[in-house]
Amino acid sequence: MQKKKKEVKITKPKFRVVWSTVERLLKRGCSGALVASKIGCSYDTLKKYYFLEGKNIIKVGDEVLAEFSTFSEYIAYFQSKGDVDVLDKYYKLALQGDRHALEFILKNRLGWSDKKQIHQNHSGEVKMNQLTLNTPPPSEDE
């Protein structure tokens, strides 16, 4: 009678997720799929490790800063943190007198706009204003 050969099961080594890298990439605006690709795994693997490693709660000491019920909420949280960091930097530039940053804030946050106006008087003379900042109408609360 022949001896049965023992089957050798080949398994992949356990994947290690460096969560600080994941969070840094999410803050930079990367999607979950792009982050997974960058760190060398599939989106499903990244999602699986999110649940296995209990990343649905962010704590500082004993204080819970955020709790997520889904992986999508985790992604949105760090993408939003990145957005806030960028806006904060731009806001500081505007307050320091950076004209482009100030104009950007006025247009995007306060509803101002560039408006080209062309005026022609009866003599045929044409005047054009390049930039007019129009403030939005006051709200009913004011």
Image (cartoon, rainbow, N blue to C red):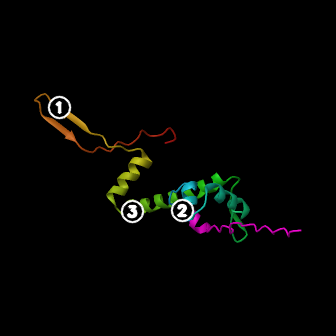
Magenta region, residue range: 1-22
User: Callout 3: helix, strand or loop?
Assistant: helix
* Quadrant housing residue 129: top left
Label 2 and label 3: CA atoms lie apart by 31 Å
Q: Are marks 2 and 1 in contact (CB under 8 Å)?
A: no
Residue 44 is one of the magenta-drawn residues: no
Label 2 and label 1: CA atoms lie apart by 58 Å
Q: Residue at x 57, y 64 (%)?
A: 39
Q: Position of residue 102 (x, y in %)?
A: 37, 55
User: Callout 2: helix, strand or loop?
Assistant: helix
Q: Amino acid at mark 1?
A: Gln
Residue 6 is one of the magenta-drawn residues: yes
Q: Position of residue 7 (x, y in %)?
A: 78, 67
Residue extending farthest left: 123
Q: Are marks 2 and 3 in contact (CB under 8 Å)?
A: no
118 with respect to 63 (left or right): left
* Quadrant housing residue 59: bottom right
Q: Can residue 56 be seen here?
A: no
Q: Which mark is residue 129?
A: none
> Of callouts 3 and 1, which one flags the residue occurring earlier in the amino acid sequence?
3
Q: Which residue is mark 3?
A: 93
Label 3 and label 1: CA atoms lie apart by 38 Å
* In the rendered image, the vertical position of residue 142 relative to residue 7, given as above or below: above
User: Callout 1: helix, strand or loop?
Assistant: strand
Question: Comparing marks 2 and 3, which lies closer to the viewer?
Answer: 2
Q: Which mark is residue 120?
A: 1
Q: Which residue is mark 2?
A: 38
Q: Residue at x 81, y 69 (%)?
A: 6
> Of callouts 2 and 3, which one flags the residue occurring earlier in the amino acid sequence?
2
Q: Amino acid at mark 3?
A: Leu
* In the rendered image, the vertical position of residue 83 relative to residue 19, given as above or below: above
Residue extending farthest top: 122
